[in-house]
């Protein structure tokens, strides 16, 4: 099986994070995981930029709003597409650099379609 473009999952719920990771890996994607925005920023400084970031909004330490704002200010990361994963639909519009929103619970057909759009 060929490995497709890398994806970064930023999600504090371990069960959701692991399930998303497993499903995407089964589709052939390389997946990296962090449990909050601060961990994600630290990881981005150590790796080649991923092709896509799947971002939860409500997390401890550094939430998705703060993370999205931080990478928007960094030229090396500002062009990475962000797809929001959230149950808080009324706040998703506040993330200006998000390409789209997937509402929790995430439907896998919609997830795969969205990921293919940005990662092939």
Image (cartoon, rainbow, N blue to C red):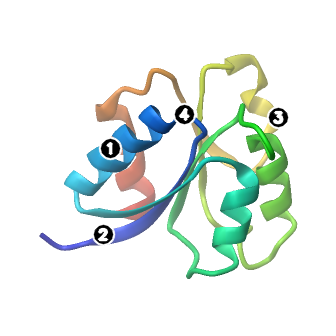
Question: Is 61 on the left or on the right of 46, as rendered?
Answer: right
What is the CA distance from the residue labelled 4 to the residue labelled 2? Answer: 25 Å
Quadrant into which the N terminus falls: bottom left
Badge number at residue 21: none
Which residue is identified by label 1? 112
Residues at circles 4 and 3 in contact by the CB criterion of under 8 Å: no
Question: Is 2 on the left or on the right of 29, as rendered?
Answer: left
| Dot 3: element | helix
Residues at circles 3 and 1 in contact by the CB criterion of under 8 Å: no
Badge number at residue 13: 4
| Dot 4: element | loop
At a point 78% along the width and 52% down the height, the residue shown is 67
Residues at circles 2 and 3 in contact by the CB criterion of under 8 Å: no
What is the CA distance from the residue labelled 2 to the residue labelled 3? Answer: 30 Å
The answer to which of marks 1 and 4 sits earlier in the sequence is 4
Q: Nearer the viewer, mark 4 or mark 3?
A: 4
In this rendering, the answer to whether 104 lies above or below 4 is: above
At a point 66% along the width and 60% down the height, the residue shown is 40
Which residue is identified by label 3? 94
The answer to which of marks 2 and 3 sits earlier in the sequence is 2
What is the CA distance from the residue labelled 1 to the residue labelled 2? Answer: 13 Å
The answer to which of marks 3 and 1 sits earlier in the sequence is 3
Which residue is identified by label 2? 4
What is the CA distance from the residue labelled 1 to the residue labelled 4? Answer: 20 Å
Question: Is 40 on the left or on the right of 65, as rendered?
Answer: left
Residue 6 pos. (x, y %): 42, 68
In this rendering, the answer to whether 69 lies above or below 89 is: below
At a point 51% along the width and 22% down the height, the residue shown is 104
């Amino acid at each position: 099986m060929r490995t497709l473009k890398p994806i970064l999952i930023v999600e504090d719920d371990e069960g959701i994070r692991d399930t998303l990771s497993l499903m995407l890996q089964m589709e052939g994607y390389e997946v990296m995981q962090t449990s909050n925005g601060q961990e994600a920023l630290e990881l981005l400084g150590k790796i080649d930029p991923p092709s896509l970031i799947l971002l939860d909004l409500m997390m401890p330490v550094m939430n998705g709003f703060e993370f999205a704002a931080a990478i928007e200010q960094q030229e090396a990361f500002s062009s990475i597409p962000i797809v929001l994963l959230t149950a808080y639909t009324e706040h998703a519009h506040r993330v200006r650099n998000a390409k789209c929103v997937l509402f929790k619970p995430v439907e896998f057909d919609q997830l795969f379609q969205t990921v293919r759009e940005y990662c092939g």
